[in-house]
Image (cartoon, rainbow, N blue to C red):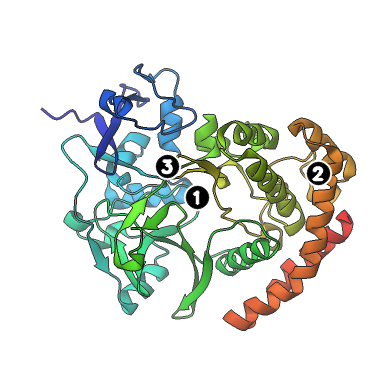
Amino acid sequence: MIDPDALNVWCEDRLVGYLWRNPVGAIGFRYEPDWIDTGGFAISWSLPLTTEDFSTQDNVAHRFFANLLPEGGVREHIVRDLKIPNTDFDLLRAIGGECAGALSILSVERHPSADQSYRPLPGKELAQLIARRGQIYAAWPKDKRPRLSLAGAQDKCPVLIRDDHYFLPEGEAPSSHILKFELADYRHLPAYETFTSHLAGQIGLPVVDIELHSIEKRFYAQIERYDRVWDAGSGTGGEVQRLHQEDFCQALGYGFEKKYQDSGGPSFATCYRLLQDASTDPAIDTQNLLRWQIFNVLAGNSDGHAKNLSILYLPNGEIRLSPFYDLVCTRAIERIDYHLAFGIGGQRDPGQITTKHWKSLAEECDVGSRFLIRLVEETATSLLEQIGQTKALFEEQYGDYPSLQRIERIVTQQCRRAT
């Protein structure tokens, strides 16, 4: 008899472990012994390899797996479309086949499919998908329904792109890109994210590959997944392989509701120390993390929280900070809180941060204050040099976009304050 309150966790065709829930919905996890014995990796910094159960009492496993799920209104749409109970366990069972990272979560009677199946998205269907902002479950036949889960509160949809053609993964087939859409109140969001990411890349930060596209007068951002790679040497003619990753909430054992420091989540210094311990190249990765936080302050990204940072587990055994993603100048958007997700020396108002606050952050991270101040000054100088050129390149590629002037004004003001 199949246990309705049990799920299997897979990495490709290898069984990693098991999930179960208690009568009140708390989720436990146990590694499969063969996964441990044959060189399997710990799927999270917070879930080390052990033969002991991660029980339903301590909630550490529950928090890790719940962090794979959508949040807020996106989650509510999926629950309504699929007509399932709004619980983490039921959502994992319904849409956990293709998540961030390398894990697939399936019912105990299912095994990962050996065939990767995709449904073509010709122009008309792609336009409909964009118009629905990626809400796919009500529109697809149940037997071919994709099982896609992306964390976060923003509408987004994983797709496969091969030779400039779009496909929707069926079952638990892996995707290669993520599409992010305009919102009713935030129409410029795809353009702002594309531009802010390009600006970060222009000053040398490692960022995701993101492009702005439009169809039937609707813009969307197209982001290449850093946790997916094509078969070696095959280009887009082969198959997509998953790389494992986890965000900093997962690695540190926090639930997604605590992704902001002000909500009881980790501080920047806590994230910095995690990277010192976890990264196989901490000198490079911790410096990039510092530069990311400096960029957030200077470029007006107040939404740089713990779920917008991830650790990537590479096939050669290295553990590295992932490329930066979800970079948006949120201060250019009305009605979004301008306070920083991570405080700088206790200060969350970006307009009030002074050298004193940067020195305090340096002390919290145990780095030299002179070193950090120099990074701030270098980043500000580089942004002032690149902001105009990046805007020109963006508009050369995508056409005039007058709203970018808001970002240019905010970045220039913040950088001049910092220098």
> Relative to 112, is 390 above or below?
below
So how many labels did they put on this image? 3
Mark 3: secondary structure: loop
Rounded to the nearest angstrom, the CA distance separating label 3 from label 1 is 12 Å
Q: Earlier in the sequence, mark 3 or mark 1?
A: 3
Kind of residue indicated by mark 2: Leu
| Horizontal relation, residue 11 to residue 328: left or right | left
Percent of width and height locating residue 48: 44, 25
| Horizontal relation, residue 194 to residue 218: left or right | right
Kind of residue indicated by mark 3: Leu
The residue pinned by badge 2 equals 372
- Whether residue 319 is visible to the viewer of this picture, yes or no, is yes
- Whether residue 255 is visible to the viewer of this picture, yes or no, is no
| Horizontal relation, residue 406 to residue 88: left or right | right
- Residue beneath the point at 28% across and 23% down: 33
Answer few, some or many: residues within 10 Å of disc 2's Cα (few below 14, many 20 plus, some between 14 and 19).
many
The residue pinned by badge 3 equals 68
